[in-house]
Image (spheres, helix red, strand yellow):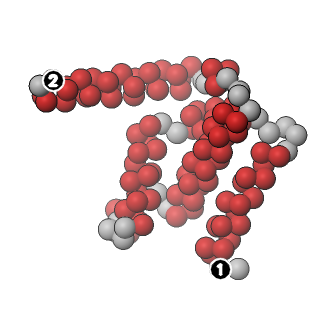
């Protein structure tokens, strides 16, 4: 089976997980945020885009293709989980993120707020 079809099949199979009796979208969301930091997500998405736009050079790729496939799969899983949680009216505040993840997210959000405020002051 060619590589693209294999990837398509793998992505198609992910959607079937939501029909399993023990599927919990909140657990999927928790797993994603406990694994990926915002800066990692940003770097990985930029790498995916640069590869797509054919401007990424092989020697500048920080991640291997298998790692990027794993990341793309994780993004797809978390998007499906958010969609299902919204559809089922599940309260996302039930998430149980690790203490380390909560601190990391708080720090990332505060830093982005400071940057936004800086640029807001510059634009006035």
Question: Which labelled disc corresponds to residue 121?
Answer: 2
Q: What residue is drawn where x is 85% and y is 44%?
A: 20
Q: Which residue is mark 1?
A: 2
Q: What residue is drawn where x is 62% and y is 75%?
A: 3
Which one is closest to the eye, mark 1 or mark 2?
2
Query: Left or right: 99 with respect to 124?
Result: right
Query: Left or right: 121 with respect to 100?
Result: left
Question: Which labelled disc corresponds to residue 68?
Answer: none
Position of residue 27 measured from the top left corner of the image (x, y, whole percent): 71, 33
Q: Quadrant of residue 79?
A: top right
Q: Quadrant of residue 34?
A: top right
Q: Label 2 crowding class (10 Å Cα cut-off): few <14, some 14-19, many 20+? A: few
Above or below, 30 relative to 56: above
Q: What residue is drawn where x is 42% and y is 66%?
A: 52
Is residue 79 visible in the rendered image? The answer is yes
Looking at the image, which residue sits at the far bottom? 1
| Secondary structure category for the residue under label 2 | helix
Position of residue 26 measured from the top left corner of the image (x, y, whole percent): 69, 31
The quadrant of the image that shows the N terminus is bottom right
Earlier along the polypeptide chain: callout 1 or callout 2? 1
Looking at the image, which residue sits at the far right? 21
Is residue 74 visible in the rendered image? The answer is no
Position of residue 70 measured from the top left corner of the image (x, y, whole percent): 59, 54
Label 1 and label 2: CA atoms lie apart by: 52 Å
Q: What residue is drawn where x is 52% and y is 64%?
A: 65
Above or below, 70 relative to 24: below
Please state which of residues 81 and 72 is positioned toward the viewer in this rendering.
Answer: 81
């Amino acid at each position: 089976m060619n590589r693209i079809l294999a990837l398509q099949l793998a992505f198609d199979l992910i959607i079937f997980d939501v029909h399993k009796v023990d599927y919990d979208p909140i657990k999927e969301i928790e797993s994603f945020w406990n694994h990926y930091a915002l800066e990692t997500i940003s770097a990985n998405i930029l790498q995916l885009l640069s590869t797509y736009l054919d401007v990424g050079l092989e020697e500048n790729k920080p991640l291997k293709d298998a790692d990027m496939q794993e990341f793309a799969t994780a993004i797809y899983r978390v998007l499906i989980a958010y969609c299902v949680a919204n559809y089922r009216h599940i309260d996302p505040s039930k998430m149980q993120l690790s203490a380390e993840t909560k601190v990391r997210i708080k720090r990332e959000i505060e830093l982005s707020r400071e940057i936004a405020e800086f640029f807001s002051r510059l634009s006035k």
